[in-house]
Image (tube, rainbow, N blue to C red):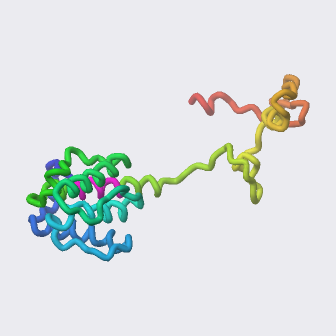
Amino acid sequence: MSLHSPGHGQQRPARYSPQETIKIYTDWANHYLERGGCKRRVTDLQADLCDGVLLADLVEAVTNQKVIDVNRKPKNAQHMVENVSLCVGALRALGADVGAVNPGELSTGTTLRPVLALLFALSRHKQRAKQLQDMPRLPSPYNKQSAGGVGPTGTSIPLPATVAATRRCPPDKVRPAPAPAHQTQLGEYTSPSSFHFRLIPKSLFYP
């Protein structure tokens, strides 16, 4: 949702009432709690997450990372602050921008502001992680596994003869580089290993 004023012909972003915002965040949290196999559900954002126990379950369900040392049966305010601090610290360690979320303020359960701020940071972290996961990955040229016509480098592009020869030799017995290639009248190079390739005009690289 953009906070900038829309240009000509653009629709203004939807504005949600406080009740609608709370419902959106509650449904989002319960969706991941259900996916994570947690039996508890959020019914009151302001009260249910303040002790840090259900909050830790939510962080674990969204990030697939364990929040360690959580006190599952907090008996006082100090335990609650420590639990929330562990959740905030776990998100910060994962690279999430938690901003200035105050664990002490969140653990009091007297205001929704820190709760919504932390859940917003958690949702943004999840979105960025999914975008990185969906990005296409190039094959590594150093993969030594080969299958189905793929060479020892993990790609079907053959290695130059000089590199291939060097890779097959022990470090203390590296073969000398082949003799300089001889240019023919056809504009081709012929090396001692019978590796032929046609010269590419420089105009293709420097238009």
> What is the x, y in percent for residue 120?
24, 56
Q: Which residues are magenta?
A: 118-127
* Foreground of the two, 175 or 64: 64
Q: How many marks?
A: 0
Question: Residue 193: which quarter of the image?
Answer: top right
**Picture residue at 40% right of the left edge, 59% below the top:** 66
* Foreground of the two, 166 or 103: 103
6 drawn magenta: no
**Picture residue at 72% right of the left edge, 46% below the top:** 153
The correct choice, above or below, for 169 with respect to 139 in the image is above
| Left or right, residue 163 beside residue 13 | right
- Residue 1 visible within the image: no
| Left or right, residue 145 beside residue 182 | left
Q: Quadrant of the C terminus?
A: top right
Magenta region's main secondary structure? Answer: helix
Question: Residue 160: which quarter of the image?
Answer: top right
| Left or right, residue 105 beside residue 59 | left
> What is the x, y in percent for residue 72?
29, 65
Q: Quadrant of the N terminus?
A: bottom left
* Foreground of the two, 22 or 153: 22
The correct choice, above or below, for 36 with respect to 12 in the image is below
